[in-house]
Image (spheres, coloured by chain):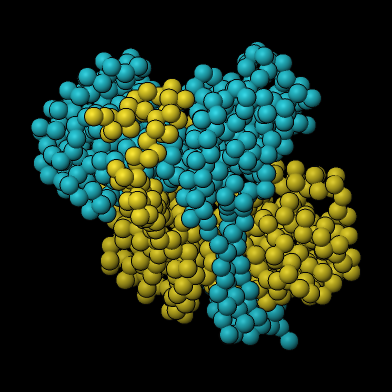
Chain colours: A yellow, B cyan
Amino acid sequence: MKTIQITEESRKNLQEQLLKRNPSSYGEFEEQVAQIIDEVKKKKDQALFSFTERFDHAVVTADTILVTKEEIEEAYTLVDPELVEIIRKAKANIVEYHEKQRQYSWFDSKPNGSMLGQKVTPLKRVGVYVPGGKAVYPSSVLMNVLPAKVAGVDEIIMTTPPMRDGKVYPVTLVAANEAGIDRIYRVGGAQAIAALAFGTESVPKVDKIVGPGNIYVALAKKAVYGHVSIDSIAGPSEILVLADETANPRFVAADLLSQAEHDEMASAILVTTSRELAEQVSKEVDRFVAELSRTEIMQKSLDQYGYILLAKDMEEAVETANEIASEHLEIITANPFEVMTKIRNAGAIFIGEYSSEPLGDYFAGPNHVLPTNGTAKFFSPLSVDDFIKKSSIIYYSREALEPVHEDIIKFAAAEQLTAHANSIKVRFEE
Amino acid sequence: MKTIQITEESRKNLQEQLLKRNPSSYGEFEEQVAQIIDEVKKKKDQALFSFTERFDHAVVTADTILVTKEEIEEAYTLVDPELVEIIRKAKANIVEYHEKQRQYSWFDSKPNGSMLGQKVTPLKRVGVYVPGGKAVYPSSVLMNVLPAKVAGVDEIIMTTPPMRDGKVYPVTLVAANEAGIDRIYRVGGAQAIAALAFGTESVPKVDKIVGPGNIYVALAKKAVYGHVSIDSIAGPSEILVLADETANPRFVAADLLSQAEHDEMASAILVTTSRELAEQVSKEVDRFVAELSRTEIMQKSLDQYGYILLAKDMEEAVETANEIASEHLEIITANPFEVMTKIRNAGAIFIGEYSSEPLGDYFAGPNHVLPTNGTAKFFSPLSVDDFIKKSSIIYYSREALEPVHEDIIKFAAAEQLTAHANSIKVRFEE
């Protein structure tokens, strides 16, 4: 791994290198996606099924689009029962954590006969997209469905592309069923996103679409945003380990690689105050890369976006971590809790040497859908918040309005809105 | 006003008519906006000042871009002191309401030595855009700045286009100063948005941009989204009054017009169970239109997007209101609180005959930046939530990790991520 002393310039260059991973234009795909959306909007099921045949090479009809109870039952016979048990344990932890994120309606009334409040309502219907392909991530199904479930969403439906024989990966079905999904539609790609956004004869329109997907899915979500709500579009995975001389270099190296293995655009960064640790971690990383699978991906990721940054003290290290605003941040120092209080920007913060990143990916409970590419400066992890919305409540009695009505009329007049003023005035006319 | 009996078909047609106001493509402007952003990103101040000269016909330099203390003091001498007092009263109400929206960090620890939590951090720097032109809205300055202030944002800066003489409207300066803005930059348009998003020598990069603007500003905000955060892009204003035979037709008519006067695309809808009320309101509307100013705007808005909908009962009326998901919803019925409990979708809900919409626009305290065009189904009013973000906190001791580490390794293996598995494994190797 490249080892660099932190300077103002090296920090700036690093930021620019990382932001390169943020693709600013996908012209060629955008047009194709716009066409797919347009077709599905117009021809509904007919277009949806014809795209499924063209892109997924699978025949799906109005009669077969829904995954049946029998298929879900069959899926359980095909998945390792031990994995099913682990999924259930993970689910319990995820639900327990997300329950704590619930928000409640409140109101505040005053003796003059006025009441202000905020009403919290869950979204009515949510669509979760689950990618097909070789990489099947049951953890991702849990992380996207369960917050909606905890929020109290009436109806959670899933779309996922079928295999050539029309089937869906058994482990996806099991995870979806454990998470409590209401219905699963075997369609994928931009056409599935369009169906969720506008509705077809078979697929109902939803209020929000969440879940990861390839470039077509991401662009389709972006295109339908505003018409429905979407989650934020995830970039490549990232880890930043903040460590001092007390850290175990083998732990640090293993953790850096746990993100580097995701894809070639993933970024793994160690920020440390210890030159000795830097050297040891670099050696351990080389040793692990040779031992583990996915070597090529890890090596490319490390070459392009892997860094060991040397800080002159913990203050500079923290400042650098805040500037990078990593998706995952591990703190492996003598006083990790103390350091945590100074962290401003990170998706998830892992404290101490036994809180390794995969613990959060699969098991602990907090969501693994996290802001990437510096967006932890202003975005939050996926949460129950994403599946509720709020309405303001305003009640004033005549007695409450009377003493302030002249003020409101004057304010409206100052903004030259006479009908606004009139709406107050009319209530006090003789 | 058009009076229509509610049927499945009339509801569908109405929805389609309202959604027409949602402009799906602005091709010609988009390219121009992209060019402006690109120039400012590359040439920074130089481009910012040259666009200001071209579009606002005002000369601004690095030395004069910041509004001075003296200008703010001067502004106070130019604004009606009574209006300043009203602005202060409104501010107090807005702050009091938004204080109740504050969210706090929490953690939950267990005796096995584990701790999970959620850390709430305010955004560091926020930019508020304030439009120039004839319509000066001090209420909008308060509503955009104060939630950020209550959230604890470190630095809140404002940009607003200068007049030809380089000055800024006095009432904007007074409202900004009362709201506690840190600095005001006299630049506007897409070039100001670009400066806020990428930073120039004079204008610092922010984490989030909020505030209304013309089509150039809206498109620029959309273009920089992801690089920074933005608020949602507001559509034309809307009111829906839900009323029964107990409602005062003059009040209802006045309230419908308070939104119709905003612009020709604004929508004013009465949903009622009473044909008699429908007839009376229609007459009162005609009478007010003749009396008030902004007649042409109101008439066009009513012709295109004004409706009186007759419902067979309160249940159908409520269902229709939920389907339209109006920005503002007034409930003027015999039991307005009871009806409120059945409302699922609305930006702000005004209860009873004295809670007219302008009370909320200016004075009561809840935010007047609300979701429009049906987006109240999944979006919320602007709030303190928009100026904070969250980080997950995960701490497991060795004792907490040990009993579950095999499960995590198996989960990772099932997803074929061996480096993830390794990061757990390495912590328990001999």
Q: Position of residue A411 (x, y in %)?
A: 45, 30
Quadrant of the image containing the N terminus of chain A? bottom right
Q: Is residue A26 visible?
A: no
Residue sitting at x 70%, y 71%: A337
Tell me if B165 is positioned left or right of B19 in this view. right
Q: In which image quadrant can residue A54 be found?
A: top left
Residue sitting at x 25%, y 41%: B353
Tell me if A139 is positioned left or right of B360 in this view. right
Residue sitting at x 31%, y 57%: A155
Q: Nearer the viewer, residue B202 or B29?
A: B202
Report the number of discs. 0
Residue sitting at x 49%, y 54%: B101
Q: Nearer the viewer, residue A44 or B334?
A: B334
Asked if A383 appears above or below B253 in the picture, the reply is below
Q: Position of residue B232 (x, y in %)?
A: 48, 39
Asked if A150 appears above or below B7 in the picture, the reply is below
Q: Position of residue A367 (x, y in %)?
A: 53, 63
Asked if A255 appears above or below A113 in the picture, the reply is below
Q: Is residue A286 visible?
A: yes
Asked if B256 appears above or below A275 in the picture, the reply is above
Q: Position of residue A410 (x, y in %)?
A: 43, 28
Q: In which image quadrant can residue A75 be found?
A: bottom left
Quadrant of the image containing the C terminus of chain A? top left
